[in-house]
Every structure is written in structure tokens, then in C-alpha cells.
Amino acid sequence: MSEDKQQQAMEDITRAVMNLLDKWKLDNKTMHQILAMSDDVRTRSFASFRDGKAVFPNHPDVLRRSQYLLRIADALRTAYPMNPKMIGRWIHQGQRRFGGRTPISMILNDGETGLVTVLSELDCTFAWDCTGSKAVTCAK
């Protein structure tokens, strides 16, 4: 991939993920934790990410978690096509399938495993890829 295309892809990913995390009404510290940003990325950097003045670090953990987040957002749009507010609401509601825990608490407390668990609950094709005939590794 050319550098221009890679830069554009990082801009698109950063914009989409920031838009999602803002819909979830999370503070910068929580966003930092969800994305597993390194300590050298300050929480004040999120204003630059939000404004399009900077892009996420090109780090495998950040990119993988961003992909999980974007797939969660897509699954929520599919599950609630007539209610776009559910993208922001569902993540904060206790879920019976998670023993009453909220999806955001799963993500924050269980890290990448929590992201995978939430995504698996929302997207059966992702869950099938993890456990079905392909048997790919879905999380560390």
C-alpha cells in the first residue's frame, strides 16, 4: 500500500473510531484504555484525533482494537437499523448474556478479550470465524 493510501486509511480509521467513542460518551482516559494506547500518547492527544489533526499510532494493538470497535458499531447498526441512538445506548446497558454486566465494563475490565466477547455477541459471523470451521485465532 502506498504511503498516501496508508495515511488516508489511518485518517479514516481515526475519524470513524473517534466518532464511535464520542457517541458512547467516553472520556479521553477511557478511550486511551480501550485502544491500548502507549503511555507516550497523552490523553490530550484525543482532541487532535477528534479534529483530524493527528491519526492513531500505527501500532498493531491499536489497529486491531480499532477494527473490533468498528465491527461492533457496524453490528449495532445492523441490529438496530431504525434506532441509531442504540449505538450509544446499548454499550452502557446491562446485558443478560453478560451476567448483567454492561458491554463497556466488559471491554474495560477484560481488555481485548472483552472486545472479542462483545463483538461475538453482536456479530454471529465473527463468532463463527472464531469457533467454526476456519478456527482462526480471534484474540491474543
Image (cartoon, rainbow, N blue to C red):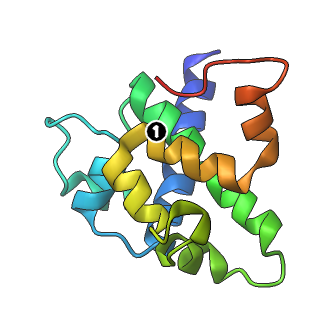
Q: Which residue is mark 1?
A: 113
Where, by quadrant of the figure, is residue 81 drawn?
bottom right
> What residue appears at the point 32 percent right and 52 percent down from the top-left corner?
109
Task: Please tell me whether mark 1 sits on a helix, a strand or a loop.
Answer: helix
- Badge count: 1
Where, by quadrant of the figure, is residue 134 drawn?
top right
- Position of residue 20 relative to residue 136, above or below, is below
Quadrant into which the N terminus falls: top right
Q: Nearer the viewer, residue 100 or 68?
A: 100
Viewer can see residue 61: yes
> What residue appears at the point 46 percent right and 22 percent down from the top-left corner?
140
Type of amino acid at the residue the image marks with label 1: Thr
Q: Nearer the viewer, residue 67 or 13?
A: 67
- Image position, residue 108 (x, y; %): 34, 54
Which residue is the extreme one toward the front? Answer: 99
Where, by quadrant of the figure, is residue 16 drawn?
bottom right
Alpha-carbon neighbours of circle 1 within 10 Å: few (<14), some, or many (≥20)?
A: some
> What residue appears at the point 56 percent right and 71 percent down from the top-left corner?
95
- Image position, residue 86 (x, y; %): 65, 79
> What residue appears at the point 37 percent right and 43 percent down from the top-left corner?
111
Viewer can see residue 58: no
- Image position, residue 117 (x, y; %): 56, 46
Q: Is residue 117 left or right of residue 50?
A: right
Q: Is residue 93 left or right of residue 84?
A: left
